[in-house]
Amino acid sequence: MRTISVFAACVLAAGSAGAQGLFDYSGPDRMAKITAAAKKEGTLTMYTTFAEKDQPTLIRPFEAKYGVKVNIWRAGTDKVLQRTLAEAAAKKYGVDLIHFGSPEMEALSREKILQAVNSPVHKDLQPGSVPAHREWAATLLSVWVQVYNTNLIKKSDLPGAYKDLLDPKWKGKLGIEAKNQDWFASVVDVMGGGEKGLQFFRDLVAQNGISARTGHTLLNNMVIAGEVPLALTVYNYMPEQAKKKGAPIDWFALEPAVARSNAIGVARRAPHPNAALLFYEYMLGEGQQYLVKMDYVPSNTRAPSPLRNVKIVQTDPIRSLDETDKWTKLFEDIVLKRAGN
């Protein structure tokens, strides 16, 4: 029995070494080798928060082209995180890929659950999409833009920079979503960081006021209704979809626009590592076109995007993990507690 166990261990080690070689391999036939190895495995399993209705648009072209079956388990962020951590702790290695928020991906990286990837496509991604350890990479961005009621505000009167929001003409006209402390923290950085950046928000609230609303859909609808003439934090696809339906709404982006990202990572103990690596490459490369078709903002700068010419800064996933309480309290104390309704 011991001889069989040793033999099995050697086989597993050899397979792992082969997969590891492709994760680091950079030769001209890289994709050909990954594709051939993936087809031999024939299947992969991904845990994700990606919307169920959007999965076929993304998955079917991959399966049709490569002949690799994608099995998906979908749940909310907390459940995906909990299941992945629990299975790793129990040494149950069934997942090949994980795709959800970047802060949660960083949490998995800290637990040594993810595999580093050296991919040539990384250079085409938005700044901030790939951490130094290369164990995950951003696939799509949720970008906060500024939204206004076109019956109440002229395009020519819109602010051109964050500092322009201090103009008295915006008094009583500004709204914000009540759980956007990540956006707040990033704009604090943009406006000088530390006390200088915080003072910008103190001045803004004191001089012009900000109405706080819970939920981006609600805030978007209040702009349409004219109750909030200018909202500071709405995801870009919301006003775009409403505008196409004839609503009196439009959007613009103060730069740098702030974005949250979702990311993909390969499990370190993936049972189908090559198939996982192939899908990883697909999500960051050719698959980006399908994300764009569904109104997602792609992380790949080569993909067409409604925000292609907009400078974007991504929220810091490490800060989101380690300093949530700090920034939530600052956001509450400086903005929410002084906000009007």
Image (cartoon, helix red, strand yellow):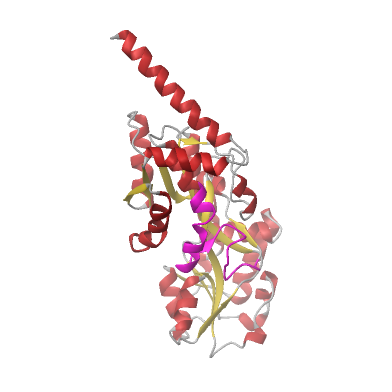
Front position in the image: 310 or 115: 115
Residue at image coords 46%, 61%:
179
Magenta span includes 305? yes
Q: Residue furthest top?
A: 2
Total numbered circles = 0
Give coordinates of residue 22: x percent, y percent. 53, 35
Give coordinates of residue 283: x percent, y percent. 49, 53
State the predominant SS element of the stretch in magenta. loop
Observer able to see residue 51: no
In which image quadrant can residue 275 be found?
top left
Front position in the image: 176 or 338: 176
In which image quadrant can residue 155 be found?
bottom right
Work out whether 47 lies above or below 340: above
In which image quadrant can residue 21 be found?
top right
Observer able to see residue 136: yes
Front position in the image: 185 or 239: 239
Give coordinates of residue 297: x percent, y percent. 53, 64
Residue at image coords 69%, 72%:
161
Q: Residue furthest left?
A: 1
Q: Residue furthest bottom?
A: 151
Magenta span includes 49? no
Give coordinates of residue 246: x percent, y percent. 45, 87
Residue at image coords 63%, 75%:
207
Q: Quadrant of the N terminus?
A: top left
Work out whether 333 lies above or below 204: above
Specify the segment rendered in magenta.
281-310
Work out whether 67 lies above or below 340: above
Front position in the image: 338 or 226: 226
